Image (tube, rainbow, N blue to C red):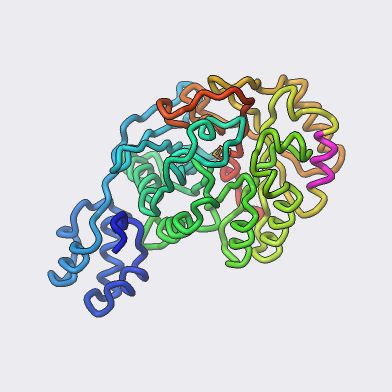
C-alpha cells in the first residue's frame, strides 16, 4: 500500500481487483458509493458489507480527510472559492462556477500544491511547486462542492475543469485516476465529457491523452502565438513550442473526436496587438478549434493590466474577420481572487519581478459541441 492512498481515490473496479476474494464486486460498489457519493466517514455505515471485508479494507485504505479552511462567496457574481486544507497542512483552492442553466455548476479544481511551470502572469506560478495532489485529494474537492450543493438544494455538479492551481499534465497519473472516480456512476457520476483538462502545453501529456481515446475535453492555454513573446510569458514554450502543442492537440482531436478549447488571456499592451491576432489566426488554421478570449485578471505584485475595451474589441473583431471561431468569456469571482490566473495560497506567493496574467476558465460552462 502506498502510504498516501485513500479510499476516495479508488473506483469499485480497482477496489475489487485490489482485494480479490476478500471483497465482492457489489461490496466494492457499496463502499465507493458510501464514501465518495455520500461522504461517509466510516465503513460501519455501509449496508450489506461483511465484517471480514470491512476489516480488510479498513486495514489497508483509510478514508482521507480534508477540511474547508475558508469559504468566500463573491459579492459580484455567484462564484464561491474554497481554501481546502490537506492532511499535511498544505492548502489548495477550488472554485464553484455557476452555469447559465440554473442549478448546474462546474467545479474548478487544483491538481498540485503550487505549480512548477512558472508562467509569468499567474498567481500560482509565483508559488513554485510544493507537491502533486493525490487522486483522492482531487476527488475530495469535487465531493465537497457536490455535498454543499445537495445540502443547500442549489443544484448539482455538471462538470469539472482542471484549471485551478497546478499543471494537470504534470501530475497526469493522479489526474486520470481522479477523473475515473469523479465520472464513475458509484463515485460522483459526472459525465467524463464534461471534464476538461487545461494545459499550458505539455506535449507528451497531450499525446498520452490522444492515445487513450478518452472522452474528456482538452483545453490549451495559448497566451501568445509568437514564439519570442510566448517564451517570455510561458517558460514551457522553450521546451514545447506552441506549434508542437497545437500539432499534439490536433492528434487529440482526430483520435477523440472532441473539439479542443483554446484559451487566450488578454493582457493589455502585451498580447493584444494586430500582429499577435494575425499570428494567432495563422496558428489556429492548423486544426479545428474554438478560441475563448478572457481578460487577464489582476494579481498583486504582477505588472500587467487587463485590456481596455478598445483593445479587447479590436483583437476580437480582427480574429473574427479572419474567420477564427472566437468567443468572449467572462471570468468571475475577481473580488475573491477566484478568477482565472488568480488562484494561489496567499502566504506561499514568492515575490517576483516578472510580468503576469492569463487564464482559461469557464470554458466548461459551454455545452459540449463535439
Ligand atoms: S498558468 Fe497554469 S501552468 Fe502556468 S504557472 Fe499558472 S497554474 Fe501553472
What is the quadrant of residue 30 in the picture? bottom left
In depth, the one of 320 and 199 nearer the eye is: 199
Is residue 366 located in the magenta-colored stretch of the structure? no
Q: Residue furthest left?
A: 51
Is residue 347 visible to the viewer in this orientation of the structure?
A: yes
The location of residue 66, given as percent across then percent down, is 29, 43
The location of residue 142, given as percent across then percent down, is 40, 47
Vertical arrangement, residue 355 with respect to residue 166, above or below: above
Is 280 placed left or right of 334 in the picture? right
Quadrant in which the C terminus appears: bottom right
Q: Residue at x 40, y 37 (%)?
A: 92
Vertical arrangement, residue 322 with respect to residue 30, above or below: above
Is residue 280 located in the magenta-colored stretch of the structure? yes
Is 164 placed left or right of 198 in the picture? left
Is residue 328 visible to the viewer in this orientation of the structure?
A: no
The magenta region covers 276-283
Q: Residue furthest bottom?
A: 21
Is 149 placed left or right of 79 in the picture? left
Is 71 placed left or right of 193 in the picture? left
Amino acid at each position: 500500500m502506498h502510504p498516501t492512498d485513500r479510499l476516495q481515490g479508488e473506483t469499485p473496479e480497482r477496489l475489487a481487483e485490489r482485494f480479490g476474494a476478500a471483497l465482492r464486486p457489489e461490496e466494492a460498489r457499496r463502499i465507493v458509493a458510501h464514501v465518495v457519493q455520500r461522504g461517509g466517514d466510516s465503513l460501519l455505515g455501509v449496508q450489506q458489507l461483511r465484517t471480514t471485508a470491512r476489516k480488510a479494507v479498513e486495514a489497508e485504505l483509510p478514508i482521507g480527510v480534508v477540511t474547508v479552511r475558508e469559504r468566500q462567496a463573491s459579492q459580484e457574481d455567484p462564484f464561491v472559492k474554497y481554501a481546502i486544507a490537506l492532511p499535511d497542512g498544505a492548502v489548495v483552492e477550488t472554485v464553484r462556477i455557476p452555469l447559465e442553466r440554473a442549478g448546474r455548476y462546474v467545479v474548478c479544481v487544483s491538481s498540485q500544491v503550487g505549480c512548477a511551470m512558472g508562467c509569468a502572469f499567474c498567481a500560482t506560478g509565483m508559488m513554485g511547486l510544493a507537491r502533486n495532489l493525490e487522486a483522492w485529494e482531487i476527488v475530495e474537492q469535487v465531493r465537497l462542492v457536490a455535498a454543499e450543493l445537495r445540502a443547500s438544494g442549489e443544484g448539482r455538479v455538471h462538470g469539472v475543469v482542471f484549471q485551478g492551481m497546478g499543471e494537470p499534465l504534470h501530475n497526469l497519473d493522479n489526474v486520470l485516476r481522479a477523473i475515473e472516480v469523479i465520472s464513475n456512476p458509484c463515485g460522483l457520476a459526472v459525465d467524463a465529457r464534461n471534464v476538461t483538462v487545461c494545459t499550458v502545453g505539455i506535449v507528451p501529456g497531450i499525446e498520452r491523452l490522444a492515445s487513450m481515446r478518452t472522452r474528456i475535453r482538452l483545453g490549451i492555454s495559448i497566451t501568445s502565438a509568437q514564439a519570442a513573446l510566448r517564451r517570455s510569458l510561458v517558460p514551457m514554450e522553450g521546451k514545447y513550442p506552441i506549434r508542437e502543442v497545437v500539432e499534439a492537440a490536433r492528434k487529440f482531436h482526430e483520435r477523440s473526436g472532441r473539439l479542443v478549447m483554446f484559451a487566450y488571456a488578454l493582457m493589455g499592451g502585451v498580447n493584444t496587438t494586430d500582429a499577435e491576432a494575425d499570428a494567432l489566426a495563422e496558428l489556429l488554421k492548423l486544426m479545428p478549434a474554438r478560441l475563448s478570449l478572457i481578460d487577464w485578471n489582476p494579481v498583486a505584485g504582477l505588472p500587467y493590466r487587463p485590456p481596455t475595451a478598445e483593445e479587447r474589441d479590436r483583437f476580437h473583431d480582427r480574429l473574427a474577420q479572419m474567420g477564427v471561431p472566437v468567443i468572449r468569456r467572462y471570468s468571475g469571482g475577481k473580488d475573491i481572487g477566484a478568477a482565472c490566473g488568480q488562484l494561489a495560497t496567499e502566504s506561499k506567493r514568492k515575490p517576483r519581478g516578472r510580468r503576469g496574467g492569463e487564464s482559461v476558465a469557464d470554458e466548461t460552462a459551454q455545452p459540449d459541441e463535439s
